[in-house]
């Protein structure tokens, strides 16, 4: 029995029924392709994260916090480590419609947060309706859209460091929030966060929600995709540069650049993670050749070796 098997055996004994061996990443990501995780642990309360932390502490075990998989691509060869998926209490959302404060678990889906806040008469969070991620992912990536970002509405985050087992309440200033980035470490789980909205008329909130939904349906593709593949360079848009480079409709295997929005790559039926990755690399090269701009991935790429797509 190797070290990882020993660790998993310990976790399985402590969390019976919550560990899945050889869990498909395709079932966990919006691209619906990719290899297996050696194991997936479903954490439903703080004690579960403490159990994982105890098992992996001081051990060189790869950890992958999965979230809703809306910004993740795992190589077809898989991930040789432990994936963590939050549920249970981490999917709870509490709204104070008087103050406009929301306390959300890390697993809460952002569209759910936006709609429930709007229904309770809390505005300023409507932009989350168009982001298919989780609260944890929003903090880690400083998710945003429609002119707003997480750093504008977050009050605090609650994190759990799997290397120490320590839980902390972290103010925004200590999160290192920048454009699609933060200082949250790979082996730190965002267990929850608090947000400050604005008390408002539920009908006005609902109208803004529906306008965002309408805009996204009109301008962004459906199907199996992970939203924006590349971050926008300063004072420009990745989608515009990809279009200028003539990449709309470009295809590698079952992966294709959307004709509707060039920064969205769609994985068609039968596509592999290798198809998507090869398309990312090819688009990046073409944009660099055509414009001199090297686009940086927003998508999290796991298991692709040297990762040619990175500079």
Image (tube, rainbow, N blue to C red):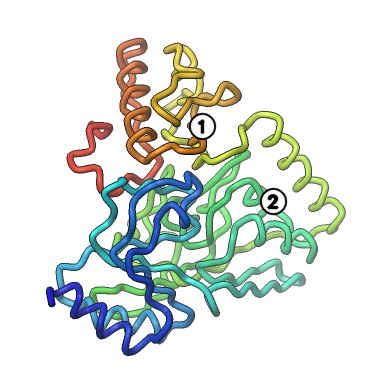
Q: Residue at x 37, y 76 (%)?
A: 19
Q: Which mark is residue 264?
A: 1
Indicate left or right for 271 with 206 as reference.
Answer: left
Q: In this view, does 60 lie above or below 137?
A: below
Q: Residues within 10 Å of mark 1 (few under 14, many from 20)?
A: many
Q: Position of residue 49 (x, y in %)?
A: 37, 79
The quadrant of the rendering that contains the C terminus is: top left
Helix, strand or loop at mark 1 = loop
Q: Which residue is drawn at 37% across and 33% down?
A: 275
* Residue 199 lies in quadrant: bottom right
Q: Pointer 2: what residue?
A: 126
Q: Is residue 55 above or below residue 131?
A: below
| Marks 1 and 2, how far apart at CA | 22 Å
Q: Where is residue 206 in the image (x, y as percent from the top left)?
A: 81, 52
Q: Residues within 10 Å of mark 2 (few under 14, many from 20)?
A: many
* Residue 251 lies in quadrant: top left
Q: In this view, does 18 lie above or below 29?
A: below
Indicate left or right for 115 with 59 as reference.
Answer: right
Query: Marks 2 and 1: in contact by CB < 8 Å?
Result: no
């Amino acid at each position: 029995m190797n070290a990882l098997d020993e660790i998993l055996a310990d976790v399985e004994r402590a969390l019976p029924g919550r560990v899945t061996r050889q869990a498909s990443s395709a079932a966990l990501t919006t691209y619906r392709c990719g290899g297996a995780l050696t194991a997936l642990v479903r954490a439903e309360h703080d004690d579960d994260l403490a159990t994982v932390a105890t098992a992996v502490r001081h051990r060189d075990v790869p950890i992958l916090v999965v979230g809703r998989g809306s910004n993740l691509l795992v190589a077809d060869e898989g991930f040789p480590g432990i994936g963590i998926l939050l549920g249970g209490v981490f999917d709870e959302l509490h709204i104070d419609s008087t103050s406009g404060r929301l306390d959300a678990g890390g697993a809460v889906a952002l569209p759910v947060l936006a709609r429930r806040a709007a229904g309770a008469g809390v505005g300023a969070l409507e932009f989350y309706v168009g982001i298919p991620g989780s609260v944890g992912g929003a903090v880690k990536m400083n998710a945003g859209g429609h002119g707003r970002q997480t750093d504008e509405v977050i009050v605090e985050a609650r994190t759990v460091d799997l290397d120490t087992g320590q839980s902390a309440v972290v103010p925004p200033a200590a999160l290192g929030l920048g454009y699609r980035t933060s200082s949250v470490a790979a082996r730190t789980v965002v267990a929850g966060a608090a947000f400050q909205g604005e008390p408002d008329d539920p009908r006005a909130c609902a109208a803004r929600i529906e306008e965002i939904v309408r805009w996204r349906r009109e301008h962004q593709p459906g199907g199996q995709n992970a939203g924006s593949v590349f971050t926008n360079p300063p004072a420009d848009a990745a989608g515009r540069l990809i279009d200028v480079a003539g990449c709309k409709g470009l295809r590698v295997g079952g992966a294709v650049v959307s004709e509707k929005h060039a920064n969205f790559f769609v994985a068609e039926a039968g596509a592999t993670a290798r198809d998507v990755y090869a398309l990312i690399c090819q688009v990046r090269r073409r944009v660099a050749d055509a414009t001199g701009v090297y686009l940086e991935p927003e998508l999290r790429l796991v298991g692709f070796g040297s990762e040619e797509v990175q500079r």
